[in-house]
Amino acid sequence: MKDKADVVIIGAGINGCALAYELSKRGKDVVVIDRKHIAAGATGRCGAGVRQQWSTKENAILAKKSVEIFERLNEELDADIDFRQGGYLIAIHSEEEMEQAKKNVEMQRSIGLPVRIIDREEIKEIVPILDPDGMEAIAATFNPTDGHADPFRTAYAYAMAAIRHGATFYKFTEAKAIKTEDGKVKSVVTNRGEIRTNVVVNAAGAWSSMVAKMAGLEIPNKPVRKEALVTEPIKRIFDAMVISFKHGIYFSQMSQGQILGGIPSPEEKVGYYTEPTFSFLQRMAYMLGKYAPVLKHINILRQWTGFYDVTPDALPVLGEDERLEGFIHCHGFSGHGFMIAPMTARLLAQLITGEKLDLPIDRLNIKRFKGKIIKEKSVVG
Amino acid sequence: MKIVCRCEDITEEDIVEAIKKYNCQTLNELKQVLRLGMGPCQGRTCLPIAARILARETGKSMEEIMPQTSRPPVIPVALYMVSEDEG
């Protein structure tokens, strides 16, 4: 095992892998460690969606810049990440939701997204299997440039490209301690040896508060348990991701034809309990039947659990900790880490290498939790 | 050519190549990179065979490799059969 590196990244999820690529491309000697393997946590369990329709400008811009990278990622990483832009259709259920949707659409259009409000007829034109009555929808918003990518393929594509640029991945290697001296990061101790470094990145997802604690830092993140299911593959019937903030449901059809989706489980709680529940299956099957009655007769193949790494404002925590030089936060993605990873990784690589940042990320620094919290409202699942 | 996973059309050669390319140590990693065992049979046919190939290629014992995570509902179940209101 190597005993020193320019940067040690803890966590081989999409954000750890993408950051390893962006840093190694810039000539940094990068080591990524993970107690399991690539995409073993939230990345490999996520809904695969890439959405730009957010209520806060920070998230919307991060997502839009990420889509611009996703669009060219196959060539950049020399891989096929299966990125498809079938759009996101977000149900609107009430006049109150309509007011918020109008505000969101206005902000989103101001940054250049081709999003619009559509009526019940158009809902059925875009996704013919939807029943607007069953959905209790009065309208929807639709952004055709939202879409999907394969989370496994994307994470592995970033990791393999990082390795080609000289990065080292140590799987099944657990961080045990982070040594500091005079307010600076000195090394990361693992179960397989110690790696000296001046920069450590906490990209541990739902386990990020444990990693922060190793450096003596408290962060307000909470792991929130989520469930999802996938059905047998059927012929292609729709391209959009369908979501509702009111019902918490999301679902879409994957490339291979299966329907993948999730909904908050009645037994959802904070903590690391991973057993899938029958009540989730009941709730999801019922709601999917209301949204798209034709799906009632297709078979469920499997269900699983994953964790959102949730912050008090549902926005990520990015940047250096002013209490500890060389400790970089890259967590708190609150259920949308996959879709913004390409831009997040680029920005953090710029920060670590001292380049000019393409976007300011000061407002996403950990120190914001001392002040007033402006919460992201458009959270689903 | 030896087919290992009939649902996802994966051969022994595919598995050996993936183990080498991605340094796979576990069935979960093979599942991620090949979709091995993610089809309608949920791995009941292919996973024991894939486990033997993985053991042979990595020098691990079968005990270290099996079992991997199994996901409910084990056998395919129609949505309407479990729907909370209309079951």
Image (cartoon, coloured by chain):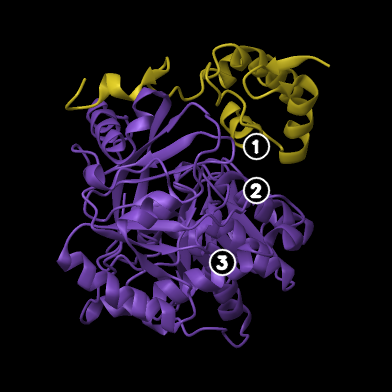
Chain colours: A purple, B yellow
- Give me the chain letter of mark 2: A
Amino acid under disc 2: Tyr
Mark nearest the camera among 1 and 3 is: 3
Amino acid under disc 3: Val
- Tag 3 secondary structure: helix
Q: Mark 2 Cα within 10 Å, few/some/many (few <14, many 20+)?
A: many
- Drawn side of residue A230 relative to residue A190, left or right: left
Q: Mark 3 Cα within 10 Å, few/some/many (few <14, many 20+)?
A: many
Which label was assigned to residue B33? 1
- The residue that mark 2 highlights is A156
- The residue that mark 3 highlights is A67
- Tag 2 secondary structure: helix
- Give me the chain letter of mark 1: B
At x 59%, y 11%, the residue is: B45
At x 52%, y 69%, the residue is: A344
Amino acid under disc 1: Val
Of residues A295 and A168, the one drawn nearer to the viewer in this rendering: A295
